[in-house]
Image (cartoon, grey):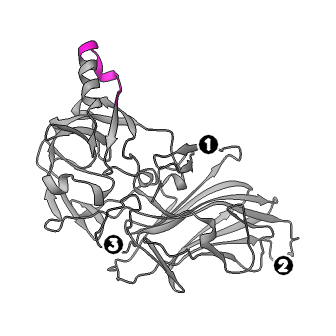
Amino acid sequence: MIICFVITICLCISLAGCNNFHAVPLPGQIEGLSMAPGLGDGEVISWLPAQTDTYQRYGRVVCTYKDELITKRIMGLPGESIRIADGEFIINGEMVRKSPRLFQHFGLIVDCQSDSWRDATQSWEHSSNNWRCERVSPKHVSWLRFHPKISPGLIPDNGGVLIYDDVSWLPKETRRLEVVKDVGISAVLDIALQEEYGLEILIGINQHMARLVVRRQGRLAVIAGRLDGQFVVTAWPIPRQHREFHEGFDGIRTPLVHEIPEEWSAEVKVAHEKIRPQAKSLLLLGIKLLAKRGEVPSEEICSVKAEELLVWRDIRWLATPKKSEWSVPAGHVFVLGDCPAASSDSRHWGSIPIDSIQGKVVQPSSGEPLPFWLHQN
């Protein structure tokens, strides 16, 4: 991704007019889609010139390549061995495993339509882009099942959904799409629950099921799914008054929250299996009232509204046709674009000298986006 010439001009002005230019953020405009969807074509950013020893893995940086300023993300450090296999990024033989906060930089929403879900137990009502269960039953689980309309990245049938690594913002893309196995569900649930009762929340992805028990009412954000060879889940409360939105470069408004957990609440290793061409994903969300044994609760004990119900996928890294392994020399870093299908980067022209890094991107940064923080795909 090329950063327009305005950055070069601003840099020269800053150098000429300020001795302490390292503290002055510089403006620039993105050209291209290699860092989409986080940084879109034409988007204005701020970046901060900094010393080379301040850079860390996963940071977005501005660097020079062939006399142009470009922005990429640091993925490999000096002395490391890099490999891309089956869509995974592997460092020194170990697969990179993302924390919730790191996942927000790479996760992609594949569907955010409430009508892509089906009421499997005649327990839910669909209205105003939400699903609501007015009377949560203690006798059975009230299920919602993901069954979207067909699209380039989604092919549903009775056995589940084929989810592909489609990139909708690349209109001229002609490569063969691959099935993605790292998929999951994120949701915000508004729970009304009487004291002394509990609510069981179940999130299922294929043969794996996450179970959460809630003892108090309120709004709860939940993320669960397969990610980097593990089945992961995390949940955290959100204030009911929180209604802050961020408008992305593609005009899509996504809610923001500032307290995404640093670690997953639970992680279970998934047995390795080679992805099959027709490997479908079955995604389910269920709720059930937990009552005392022998007690017959009234119908008004618990209600749940699914305010946001989304399906996500992880980024699928792409090797080049002729190369899938690299060694990072001393004094160099391995940089990639966030949109592998649109990026020319270290996969093609090798690692770059650390001295070529001019600074790090500090804007846009409007907060920590939550489940739906995942950039729109």
Residue sitting at x 67%, y 62% = 129
Residue tagged 1: 244
Near-viewer residue (32 or 352): 32
Q: Inspect the magenta stretch and tell me whether residue 17 lies in it.
A: yes
What's the CA distance linking mark 3 and mark 1?
A: 35 Å
- What's the amino acid at mark 2? Gly
Write down the region rendered in magenta: 16-27
Q: Are marks 2 and 3 in contact (CB under 8 Å)?
A: no
Cα–Cα span, label 2 and label 3: 53 Å
Dividing the picture into quadrants, the one containing residue 288 is bottom right
Query: Would residue 52 appear left or right of 250 to someone viewing this image?
Result: left
Determine whether the residue tagged by mark 2 lies in a helix, strand or loop.
Answer: loop
Q: Pick whichever of labels 2 and 3 is earlier in the sequence.
A: 3
Residue type at numbered disc 1: Glu
Query: Given the current orientation, which residue lies at the most extreme left position?
Result: 329
Query: Where's residue 105, x and y in %?
Result: 41, 51
Considering the numbered disc 1 on the image, is that residue within a helix, a strand or a loop?
loop
For the residues marked 1 and 2, what is the alpha-carbon distance in whole angstroms? 43 Å
**Residue located 49% across and 67% down the image:** 184
